[in-house]
Amino acid sequence: MRRLSPILVVAALAVLPTACGGGDEGHGGEHGEQSGAAAFNDADIAFAQGMIPHHAQAVEMADLADDRASAPQVRELAERIRAAQQPEIDLMGSWLEEWGRPMDEGMDHGDMDMGDMDMGEMGMMSDQAMERLESASGEEFDRLFLSGMREHHLGAVAMAEEELSKGESPEAKQLAQEIIDTQRAEIEEIDALLDA
């Protein structure tokens, strides 16, 4: 908007209340909403609401590595994942609070949605897969953890790319890019560990 002439800016601002009106049904819609100085839209809300339980499962998986993993590289990777993703959960929760949106709206288990993505595309582990991971130890745990986290990361990258494409919040888009960069690097690390 900085590139537009002052007349166009004023005209655009005059139209916004009408375009964004219509009650609570839009939840931001395509036009987004303002919370203080922070703009956001439906894609930002879906990103935070979807990524919070996604990260929470990754943290849960990482917690299991403490006394089940045999390879020190797996335990170290799990610790880095936990250290990175728990603060991101807290950050996204603060956004939803600021935006006046619940953390879990439409995000319970099979109902979780991120655009057109289903649970498999999001890389979420099923209850059965989590039970197998919980009951495993040693090299079997390492293999299940690495293969499960690889799919988990691929899902997070896809969700973050969706946010970059459709989101409006600068903070959310910055976090999405950080998730892409970090988790792509960890996927390469996971591939090397699986090959070894």
Image (cartoon, rainbow, N blue to C red):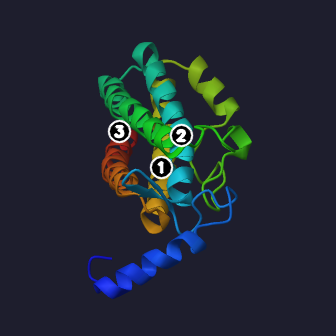
- In the rendered structure, which disc, 2 or 1, sits on the residue that comes first in sequence? 2
Q: Position of residue 142 (x, y in %)?
A: 45, 28
Q: Position of residue 184 (x, y in %)?
A: 35, 52
Residues packed near mark 3 inside 10 Å, few (<14), some (14 to 19) or many (20 plus): some
Q: Is residue 188 above or below residue 90?
A: below
Q: Are marks 2 and 1 in contact (CB under 8 Å)?
A: yes
Q: Is residue 93 above or below residue 42?
A: above
Q: Which mark is residue 54?
A: 2
The residue singled out by tag 3 in the image is: 193
- In the rendered structure, which disc, 2 or 3, sits on the residue that comes first in sequence? 2
**Mark closer to the observer (2, 3):** 2
Q: Position of residue 62 (x, y in %)?
A: 44, 26
In the depicted view, which residue is nearer to us: 167 or 185? Answer: 167
Q: Is residue 177 left or right of residue 39?
A: left
- In the rendered structure, which disc, 1 or 3, sits on the residue that comes first in sequence? 1
Q: Is residue 2 left or right of residue 45?
A: left
Q: Is residue 4 visible?
A: no
